[in-house]
């Protein structure tokens, strides 16, 4: 939502209050309808990892929305490739007005601003920052550029452990299991290749 549109919505909201519109009618205004809860995974294993995570959170607060919850920071071995540097990972819950594709592009711009460079066939590699969209409300999104829920989250301890810390009862909309259940399954089985 552009700044001008937000101002227009707020202007309508203020007029609604002045004119004595019922609270129920206020809730139907776009400013209330557009809010979405999204879970993001932040990670990186190059440079000053703690400073980069802090900078990413600051950028997310400024460009995406309010960080409502955050997990502890987990240090984990690289997944899917070998590298001497461990990753720092953290999951955050953010309230945003951005739609999924808008959110993806904003997060990619944040990654670029923090020094990430993308290679066409990147695959698994060391990186200064990676921000993944795990969930967006309870929505299922499948496009060429974006899949929500994240298609591999249920195979990754480095994702499930911090996510279970802040949202153990969140239900995966495709798998119909809670994050706590997915974590337990992941701990006791090997990921599919």
Image (cartoon, rainbow, N blue to C red):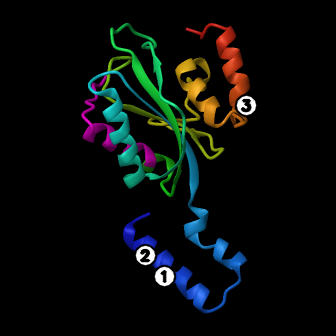
**Nearest to the observer: residue 108 or residue 63:** 63
Residue numbers of the magenta segment: 103-120
Instruction: Reply above or below: 158 against 18.
Output: above
Residue holding disc 3:
178
As helix, strand or loop, the secondary structure at mark 3 comes to loop
Residue holding disc 1:
11
For the point 44% across and 47% down, which residue is it?
103
Q: Please identify the residue farthest to the bottom as the structure is shown.
A: 19
Residue 159 can be seen in this image: yes
Residue 111, image x, y percentages: 32, 37
As helix, strand or loop, the secondary structure at mark 1 comes to helix
Asked if marks 2 and 3 touch (Cβ < 8 Å), the reply is: no
For the point 39% across and 17% down, which residue is it?
124
Distance CA(mark 2)–CA(mark 1): 6 Å
In the rendered structure, the answer to whether residue 11 lies left or right of residue 115 reads: right
Quarter of the image with the C terminus in it? top right
Residue holding disc 2:
7
């Amino acid at each position: 939502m552009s700044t001008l549109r937000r101002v227009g919505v707020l202007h309508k909201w203020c007029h609604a209050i002045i004119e004595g519109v019922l609270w129920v009618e206020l809730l139907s205004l776009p400013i209330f309808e557009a809010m979405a809860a999204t879970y993001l995974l932040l990670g990186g294993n190059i440079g000053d990892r703690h400073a980069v995570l802090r900078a990413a959170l600051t950028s997310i607060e400024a460009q995406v929305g309010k960080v409502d919850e955050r997990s502890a920071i987990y240090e984990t071995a690289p997944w899917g490739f070998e590298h001497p540097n461990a990753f720092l990972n953290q999951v955050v819950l953010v309230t945003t007005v951005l739609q999924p594709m808008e959110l993806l592009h904003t997060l990619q711009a944040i990654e670029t601003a923090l020094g990430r460079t993308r290679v066409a066939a990147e695959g698994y590699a060391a990186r200064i920052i990676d921000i993944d969209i795990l969930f967006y409300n309870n929505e299922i999104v499948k496009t060429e550029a974006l899949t929500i829920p994240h298609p591999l989250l249920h195979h990754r301890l480095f994702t499930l452990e911090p996510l279970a810390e802040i949202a153990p009862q969140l239900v995966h909309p495709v798998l119909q299991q809670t994050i706590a259940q997915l974590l337990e399954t992941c701990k006791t089985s090997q990921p599919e290749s």
